[in-house]
């Protein structure tokens, strides 16, 4: 295990993956600084819990309509150009919020409109982004590369909210949006410099001229292991993803907390995610990822129940750390299985289905949980989500783990 861990970390010393990893870290730090500041800004503008859920829905809902198109772009276009175009558009959104704050014209609906733009650009570019790792590492390093990428994401989940807490307490929320806008610059530079030019493979002879956007989707969904991974991620997104979205409401309504306490709560979630991703680096690539994904998905539901009934703020960071670890292990294990099993022609579409399950699930969950919070209160809404997560994930695991193990080295093809 120690040897596996060291070999995994060795990827950071490589030119392409190491540069990509550090640029992604800087970009993610800025994104998390904005995601901490945005719901708090909405609360200070008088927004209700439903509006906060609507903002999260607006940012994630476009994946339902556009992520399959993003997957087709990833499979048929130069991924560098796709990332460059949509990341450049996305960078303008926090810039617009800064301008609106400076002139004192910011309104909740404006933030939601900008969230829609971010969601559209994310839906179209994230399959290309998620497909980068398999293109810059060896096939037997994909699991380690994805785990390191998850480590980067969760490290930013610590550093970004920590930075946001300092900035909001000292300068104000506007500084978080400035950091977010600037953080796009290094990643765009890396996309131009370090990522390989990619030539799409020739279309399969069996490919049909019509419906090419959805070609191969049926092949992916008919595979019991890939379908099980996607259903597990979807259930996690719908039922457990809203925990992060409604953490500011939980901190403020249930514990009468401050912005710094909210920042601490989000940082704790990131610490747990970092530990979970780090633990995955020690798991050999030959280990079956299915029990890891389903087991930690069920554990995440248990943590939600405990969070809902917890009466002490001092215990909240610990519970959120456990939630972060469980969510990271479950989703990353499922993502590894999906990307390893996908063939070259289906990689982008497989990743797009993963993003559809994750981000689409989060968007739907945020909207439904926003309604539940308005009707039942934040504690009861989280309790309901946790109980449903335990039941649904247990049913998914029973079906998924009974399927035959995927054949090693035999990617699916359309």
Image (tube, helix red, strand yellow):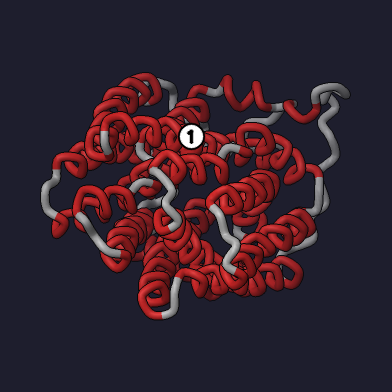
Say if 59 sits above or below 390 in the image: below
Residue situated in front as seen by the camera: 340 or 164: 164
Q: Residue at the spot x=44%, y=46% of the render?
A: 52
Q: In this view, does 200 lie to the left or right of 392?
A: right
Residue 38 seen anywhere in this rendered image of the structure:
yes
Q: Position of residue 312 (x, y in %)?
A: 12, 53
Q: In which quarter of the image is residue 101?
A: bottom right
Q: Position of residue 153 (x, y in %)?
A: 46, 60
Say if 1 sits above or below 354 in the image: below
Q: Residue at the spot x=57%, y=48% of the render?
A: 109
Residue bearing mark 1: 361
The number of discs equals 1
The local secondary structure at tag 1 comes to helix
Residue 126 seen anywhere in this rendered image of the structure:
no
Label 1 CA crowd tier, 10 Å (few <14, some 14–19, many 20+) = many
Q: In this view, does 259 lie to the left or right of 310?
A: right
Q: Position of residue 166 (x, y in %)?
A: 37, 76
Q: Which of the image's four quarters has the C terminus?
A: top right
Q: Quadrant of residue 238?
A: top left
Q: Residue at the spot x=66%, y=41% of the render?
A: 347
Residue situated in front as seen by the camera: 333 or 48: 48
Say if 29 sits above or below 410 in the image: below
Q: Residue at the spot x=43%, y=43% of the render?
A: 331
């Amino acid at each position: 295990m120690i040897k596996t861990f060291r070999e995994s970390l060795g990827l950071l010393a490589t030119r392409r993956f190491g540069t990509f990893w550090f640029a992604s870290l800087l970009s993610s730090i800025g994104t998390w600084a904005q995601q901490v500041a945005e719901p708090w800004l909405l609360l200070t503008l008088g927004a209700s819990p439903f509006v906060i859920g609507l903002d999260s829905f607006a940012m994630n809902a476009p994946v339902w309509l556009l992520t399959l198109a993003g997957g087709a772009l990833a499979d048929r276009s130069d991924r560098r150009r796709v990332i460059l175009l949509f990341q450049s558009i996305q960078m303008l959104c926090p810039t617009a919020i800064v301008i609106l704050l400076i002139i004192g014209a910011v309104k909740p609906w404006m933030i939601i409109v900008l969230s829609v733009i971010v969601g559209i650009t994310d839906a179209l570019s994230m399959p290309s982004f998620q497909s980068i790792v398999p293109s810059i590492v060896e096939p037997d390093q994909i699991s380690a590369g994805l785990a390191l990428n998850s480590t980067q994401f969760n490290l930013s989940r610590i550093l970004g909210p920590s930075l946001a807490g300092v900035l909001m307490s000292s300068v104000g929320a506007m500084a978080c949006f400035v950091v977010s806008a600037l953080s796009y610059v290094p990643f765009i530079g890396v996309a131009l410099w370090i990522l390989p030019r990619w030539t799409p493979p020739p279309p399969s002879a069996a490919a049909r001229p019509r419906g090419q956007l959805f070609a191969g989707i049926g092949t992916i969904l008919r595979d019991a292991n890939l379908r099980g991974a996607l259903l597990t991620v979807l259930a996690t997104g719908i039922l457990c993803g809203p925990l992060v979205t409604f953490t500011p409401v939980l901190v403020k309504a249930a514990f009468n907390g401050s912005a710094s306490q909210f920042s601490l709560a989000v940082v704790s979630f990131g610490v747990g995610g970092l530990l979970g991703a780090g633990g995955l680096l020690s798991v050999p690539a030959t280990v079956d990822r299915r029990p890891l994904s389903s087991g930690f998905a069920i554990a995440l539901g248990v943590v939600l129940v405990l969070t809902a009934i917890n009466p002490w703020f001092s215990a909240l960071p610990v519970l959120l750390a456990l939630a972060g670890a469980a969510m990271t292990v479950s989703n990353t294990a499922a993502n590894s299985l999906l990307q390893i099993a996908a063939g070259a022609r289906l990689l982008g579409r497989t990743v797009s289905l993963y993003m559809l399950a994750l981000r689409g699930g989060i968007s739907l969950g945020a909207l439904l949980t926003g309604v539940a919070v308005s009707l039942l209160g934040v504690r009861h809404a989280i309790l309901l989500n946790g109980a449903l997560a335990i039941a649904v994930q247990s049913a998914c695991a029973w079906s998924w783990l009974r399927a035959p193990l995927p054949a090693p080295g035999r990617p699916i093809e359309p």
